[in-house]
Amino acid sequence: MTLKEQIDIERLPKHIAIIMDGNGRWAKEQGKPRLFGHQSAIKSVREVNEACAELGVGYLTLFAFSTENWNRPAQEVGGLMLLLGQTLKNEVPTLVKNNIRLVVTGDVERMPKENYRQLKEAIDTTANCSGMVLNLALSYSGRWEITEAVRRIAAEAKEGRINPNDINEDTLRAYLPSANIPDPELLIRTSGELRISNFLLWQLAYSELYFTNRYWPDFRKDDLYEAILDFQHRERRFGKTSEQLKP
C-alpha cells in the first residue's frame, strides 16, 4: 500500500501551512548560487500544490517571502522578484485548469510595481475557481499581521465604531488580513530548523507542527503524505484530557 493510499481522506487537515526552507543551503551543497536553489524549489511547489488539490485539502499556505527577507542582498531579492513573476506567468494557467484559487497575504504594497501588477492579475484570473485555495504569504510576518489587525481595530475604536470593552479574541481574529482563511491544522517546516520564524503567530496556537530534515527543493508528494500520516496519528486535545475525547 502506498503512502497516499494509507491516508484517511475523512481526517485530512483542512488547512496545511508550509515554511519552505533550505533553498540556499541545498544550492550551496550543489556548488550553485542561492538563486539556483530558489529556482529548483518551483518543482516542489508544483508537486505539493497538486498533491493537496488531489487529496481534497481545502487550503494551502506557502511562506514564500517574509518581511525580514527584504534585508537580504539586493541581488538575491531582485532575483526572487523576477522568479516570482516568471512563476506566476507559468503556473496560473495550471491553477485555473485545476480549479485552484490564488490569494495573497502580506504587505504586498512593498512589492515592486510589476510584481504587484502580476499578483493582482493572477488573483483576478483565478477568482472564480471554487476548489482549493492557495494562499501565498508574501512580504509577510506574523508580527506584521497582528500589528495590522491592532491598527485597524484602534482606528475603528477611535471613530466610535468599536467599544474597547467589547474587544475579544474573535474581534482580533476578524481584523487579521488572513481573516477569511481558517487556522492551519498542520504546519510543515523543511530543512531541519525547529522554529516557526515569525509565521502565522496567531493562527498556529493549536496547529500540529511537523519538522523534516529534507530541504525544500527535495520535498515531494511522498514527503507531504508522510507529514499528513503523522498528523493523523496524533491526538488533538485542545486543552482537554484524552478521556474527555472518548465517545
Image (cartoon, helix red, strand yellow):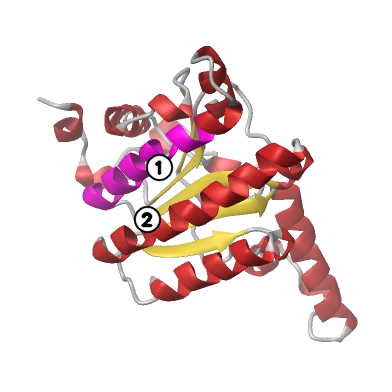
**At 29% from the left edge and 58% from the top edge, which residue is drawn?**
94
Q: Residues within 10 Å of mark 1 (few under 14, many from 20)?
A: some
Residue that badge 2 annotates:
91
**At 75% from the left edge and 45% from the top edge, which residue is drawn?**
70
Using the image, tell me which numbered label, if any, was put on residue 45: 1
Examine the rendered structure and indicate whether residue 160 appears above or below residue 129. below
Q: Nearer the viewer, residue 15 or 97?
A: 97
User: What kind of element bears circle 1?
Assistant: helix
* Location of residue 225 (image quadrant): top left
Examine the rendered structure and indicate whether residue 25 appears above or below residue 41. above
Taking the image as shown, residue 224 lies to the left or right of residue 40, namely left
Q: Nearer the viewer, residue 164 or 6?
A: 6
**At 35% from the left edge and 47% from the top edge, which residue is drawn?**
49
Main secondary structure found in the magenta portion: helix
Taking the image as shown, residue 199 lies to the left or right of residue 158, namely left
Examine the rendered structure and indicate whether residue 139 appears above or below residue 247. below
The residues colored magenta run: 37-56
Residues tagged 2 and 1 counted as in contact (Cβ below 8 A): yes
- Is 19 magenta? The answer is no
